[in-house]
Image: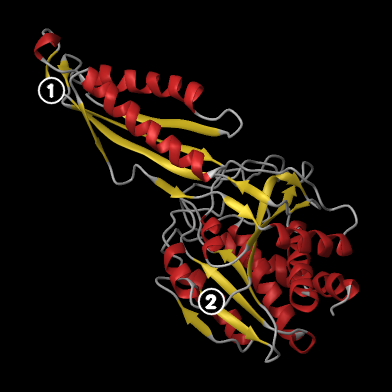
């Protein structure tokens, strides 16, 4: 059994590696599906540890540490892609310690930290292999932001007998030193709204000779507002965010268009209510369009894209006990996030747990929202992320 002192002291001694590695990732971000140099760097680090790499479609991969002693198998996951955001060299208070060198691309969601945490944990576990039992699978998922890598990774792992999967998300809405591993839904599921309202174009002087899809689309949106108020279970939050409505041209205001495109997203924490919300969208759109003599054509994108992240109750209890053994006042409760994550799909193949690790530090300036040009992390948060991960895996493999 790895002691509290061993975990805390050894991770503290690796700070230089942790900070240097994270800054490399931050300065060299790559978009979803294009993480070629990122993947190459990760694989080189994993190869140094003597672990075999199993390639997954595109840039994702996993590697396994087998202690050669019977026991459980735990997976630990990190995402590796960045976002199409032009980085600001400053955070909310200061100049950043690391700034992207790739124009228009930025690690604005903490994935640079997630990769660093997983690499650090891999180094630690390889060093302490003789004190462990079972297997540890290190999972590096490409394209999380676009959902391009998760299905291939699930296919690659589904035939392995995995007993649990653990992940970390650095979060700017929690302070450095705070960790949350609550059971139940902790991140929202997501769906996309994406349809065309088809009418009949014509001249603005004779709207009666046309079928104006703009009026139909606007009434659909009003109808959705009413339906959300009256049909969605008030105890199960579902948000609706319409992001665009496009039809016609301000260069020809006297032309009634043939069609209008409507797009948006909705978020939910209860899968059944999410499915219900999707059906409401379809029904309101179709019936309202029909009342205006229009029709609706739904894109294949008009669908639920990912379910909510739901933490397993038993894994949550193990994590809480492990974290309390390491840090007496780190745990915080009742933290949910309306963002969505492909990590939810790992629950299809094993019980899963997603830990939130706070990175907000007002003095440093690391409190900006995710997916924001000012986003930054307090690098000390990765120390907590590493220790929480190691503590959980240690307790899961040794005591359970």
Residue 234 in sight from this viewpoint:
yes
- On residue 200, the disc is 1
In the picture, which quadrant includes the N terminus?
Answer: bottom right
Looking at the image, is mark 1 or mark 2 earlier in the sequence?
2
Q: Quadrant of residue 107?
A: bottom right
Where residue 58 sits: x, y (%)?
40, 70
* 39 sits left or right of 66 in the view: left
Give residue 134's quadrant in the image.
bottom right
- Say which residue appears at 71% left-offset and 62% top-offset: 315
Vertical comparison of 3 with 47: above or below: above
The relative height of residue 162 versus residue 27 in the rendered view (above or below) is: below
Label 1, secondary structure: give it. Answer: loop
Disc 2 crowd, CA 10 A, few/some/many (<14, 14-19, 20+): many
Find disc 2 in the rendering and name its residue. Answer: 62
Q: Residue 69 in the image: x percent, y percent? A: 71, 90
| Left or right: 187 in relation to 272 | right
Residue at image coords 75%, 57%: 381
Q: Nearer the viewer, residue 239 or 229?
A: 229
Counting from the top left corner in percent of width and height, residue 193 is at 37, 37
Q: Quadrant of the C terminus?
A: bottom right
The number of discs equals 2
Query: Is the Cβ of the residue at disc 1 closer than 8 Å to that at disc 2?
Result: no
Tell me if residue 214 comes above or below residue 60 in the rendering.
above
| Secondary structure of residue under mark 2 | strand
Question: Which of the pair 27/70 is nearer the observer?
Answer: 70
């Amino acid at each position: 059994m790895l002691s509290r002192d061993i975990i805390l002291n050894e991770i503290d001694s690796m700070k230089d590696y942790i900070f240097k590695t994270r800054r490399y990732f931050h300065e060299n971000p790559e978009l979803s599906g294009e993480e070629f140099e990122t993947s190459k760097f990760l694989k080189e680090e994993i190869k140094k540890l003597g672990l075999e790499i199993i390639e997954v479609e595109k840039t994702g991969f996993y590697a396994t540490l087998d202690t050669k002693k019977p026991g459980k198998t735990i997976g630990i996951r990190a995402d590796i892609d960045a976002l199409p955001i032009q980085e600001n060299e400053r955070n909310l208070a200061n100049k950043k310690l690391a700034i992207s060198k790739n124009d228009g691309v930025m690690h604005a969601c903490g994935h640079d930290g997630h990769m660093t945490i997983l690499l650090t944990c891999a180094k630690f576990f390889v060093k302490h292999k003789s004190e462990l039992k079972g297997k540890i699978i290190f999972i590096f998922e490409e394209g999380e932001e676009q959902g391009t890598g998760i299905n291939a990774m699930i296919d690659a792992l589904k035939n392995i007998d995995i007993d649990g999967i653990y992940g970390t998300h650095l979060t700017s809405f929690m302070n450095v030193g705070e960790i949350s591993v609550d059971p139940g839904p902790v991140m929202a599921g997501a769906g996309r709204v994406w349809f065309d309202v088809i009418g009949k174009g014509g001249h603005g002087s004779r709207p009666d000779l046309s079928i104006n899809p703009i009026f139909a689309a606007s009434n659909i949106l009003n109808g959705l507002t009413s339906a959300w108020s009256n049909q969605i279970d008030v105890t199960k939050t579902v948000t609706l965010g319409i992001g665009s409505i496009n039809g016609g041209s301000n260069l020809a205001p006297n032309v009634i268009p043939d069609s209008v495109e409507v797009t948006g997203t909705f978020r939910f924490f209860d899968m059944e209510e999410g499915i219900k919300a999707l059906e409401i969208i379809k029904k309101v759109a179709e019936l309202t369009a029909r009342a205006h003599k229009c029709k609706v054509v739904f894109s294949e994108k008009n669908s639920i894209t990912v379910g909510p992240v739901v933490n397993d109750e038993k894994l949550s209890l193990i994590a809480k006990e492990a974290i309390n053994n390491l840090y007496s006042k780190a745990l915080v409760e009742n933290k949910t996030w309306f963002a969505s994550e492909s990590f939810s799909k790992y629950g299809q193949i094993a019980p899963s747990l997603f830990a939130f690790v706070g990175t907000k530090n007002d003095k440093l300036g690391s409190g900006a929202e995710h997916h924001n040009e000012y986003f930054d992390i307090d690098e000390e948060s990765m120390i907590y992320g590493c220790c929480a991960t190691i503590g959980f895996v240690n307790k899961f493999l040794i005591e359970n």
